[in-house]
Image (cartoon, rainbow, N blue to C red):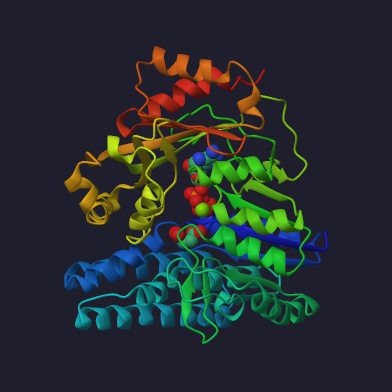
Amino acid sequence: MQTLVMKFGGTSVGNAAAIQQTADICAQQKQSSENLVVVVSAMSGITDLLIQAAQQAAGNQPERMWETIETIRTKHLQVIDALLPADSAPVAEREQVITAVTARLDELNSYCQSIQVLGEVTSRGMDVISSLGERISAQIVAALLRIMGTPSIAVEATQLIVTDRSFQNAVPQMGPSREKIRKVLHPLFHQGFVPVVTGFIGATPEGITTTLGRGGSDYTGAILADCLDADELWIWTDVDGVLTADPRVVAHARTIPEISFAEVGELAYFGAKVLHPKTIRPAVTRNMPLWVKNTFNPGFPGTRISQSATRERGEISAVTTIKDLSILTVEGRGMLGVPGIAARTFGAVARTGASVQMITQSSSEQSICFTIPSKLSEDVVASLEAEMSLELYRKDIDRIWSRDQVVILSIIGAGMRETPGVSARIFGALGKANINVVAIAQGSSEYSLSLVIDQAEANAAVRAIHDEIIPPLV
Ligand code: ADP
Ligand code: ASP
Ligand code: MG
């Protein structure tokens, strides 16, 4: 293969043994891929700890902040000690990586101290801090590859990916990014290097660090693969590919060997954490196959995601959930036929910054229901009440209320909506398990059916539906 991008997630670089395993896979793959790019996440748990340290700094909790910083420091230095031991690793390599990593850790100290003085952390400041995990892990993986005899160099994606200024959820600008990516990486390929690029991060045209959103390293992989016209993108993680359900919920969930972009897009959108939802788009545009593989079971092929994957009509691929949601209802007999109510409703929601995952409307137009993240429900209700104050006063709208602690459970499969009997089996399975359905949305795509149910019953519902409609392997 000529150009291949391989992305390794947090667990794949989560400890010394995992990093060794990752480096072994990269060194091996370099033998058959002329231009190989590696993208790495922060070690698992580190991004959370970095954010926690910043919050503790802003909350004026210096003792806790220093404890968190110490945990971050120790975790990295222990891994360096294990992978590049003082008594056997080449001295220059060890010193170089320790210098690079401690420089980042010292940056963390000073950012947190500044935040403590200011008493607040901006989203721009949060991006600089949460980018540090990837900037450290890339250094460690590149150093390990070098001592294993594979020429490699750590590259910060701030040099490659140009984004807008939407801190914490930045949008890449593909034209300028393409130019930079090719300008920086092509000379490295010619010199035989494997660039180890930081996932998750980018920079504005002025060079201010941004991040692409939590779980965004998958997206980094897709952006690089797109801009390099790569043959394939491989996402290495800690499970055997895209599975029929979250394996933490359904222990016997199984690998889906092949799946289409359209189906996997629905799966990612509806909560399967294995792929960041934005990863798919560049792959679709270029019709570039994507693989999801297991770092800890590298001989297993995993899941191939492509345009062409076909599925039997009505065959179900997966059951997913999005948790920690609230379902809001705007209800009133006076809404009947009044133009503009829906537009004003969603305008008021948008002003709070909440994104809506699913909408249903009763056919009599007496209510509109939609889901939003629970943490925003109070704000959204307040914004709606302000927007509709006149209608509430006139009793055209009777009430605006929120039901918290719900999930969206989605059943995903090509052509499922045209297949008679699927819904009956789904509702039959829920009925048998005594699980109540709060709302239903068919969605506009033919690939999914979504239900809202109480969070307390989510796992039982996933298991009941999975076991009813996904046939076991024979
Ligand atoms: P990484 O750190 O490698 O990016 P993530 O934790 O982001 O890994 O995603 C992998 C995890 O996604 C798995 O460990 C699994 O628990 C979870 N997951 C949820 N739904 C699915 C699914 N349908 N298929 C595979 N994994 C899933
Ligand atoms: N480290 C980042 C996160 O935890 C990005 C990623 O792992 O994909 O969100
Ligand atoms: Mg991930």
Please name the residue shown 71% across and 53% down the image. 284
Q: Is residue 281 visible?
A: yes
Q: How many marks?
A: 0
Front position in the image: 53 or 138 = 53
Could you say which quadrant of the image residue 301 lies in?
A: top right
Front position in the image: 465 or 107 = 465
Please name the residue shown 29% across and 71% down the image. 54
Rendered view: 319 above or below 84: above
User: Residue 267's x, y, as percent?
Assistant: 56, 41
Rendered view: 274 above or below 203: above
Is residue 73 found left or right of 1 in the rendered image?
left
Could you say which quadrant of the image residue 3 lies in?
A: bottom right
Is residue 160 found left or right of 17 in the rendered image?
right
Is residue 174 found left or right of 247 in the rendered image?
right
Q: Is residue 11 visible?
A: no
Front position in the image: 313 or 92 = 313
Front position in the image: 304 or 444 = 444
Rendered view: 30 above or below 177: above
Is residue 233 found left or right of 275 in the rendered image?
right
Please name the residue shown 60% across and 20% down the image. 472
User: Residue 365's x, y, as percent?
Assistant: 38, 35
**Quick one: quadrant of the C terminus?**
top right
User: Residue 212's x, y, as percent?
Assistant: 50, 66
User: Residue 147's x, y, as percent?
Assistant: 64, 71
Please name the residue shown 44% across and 42% down the image. 358
**Quick one: quadrant of the N terminus?**
bottom right
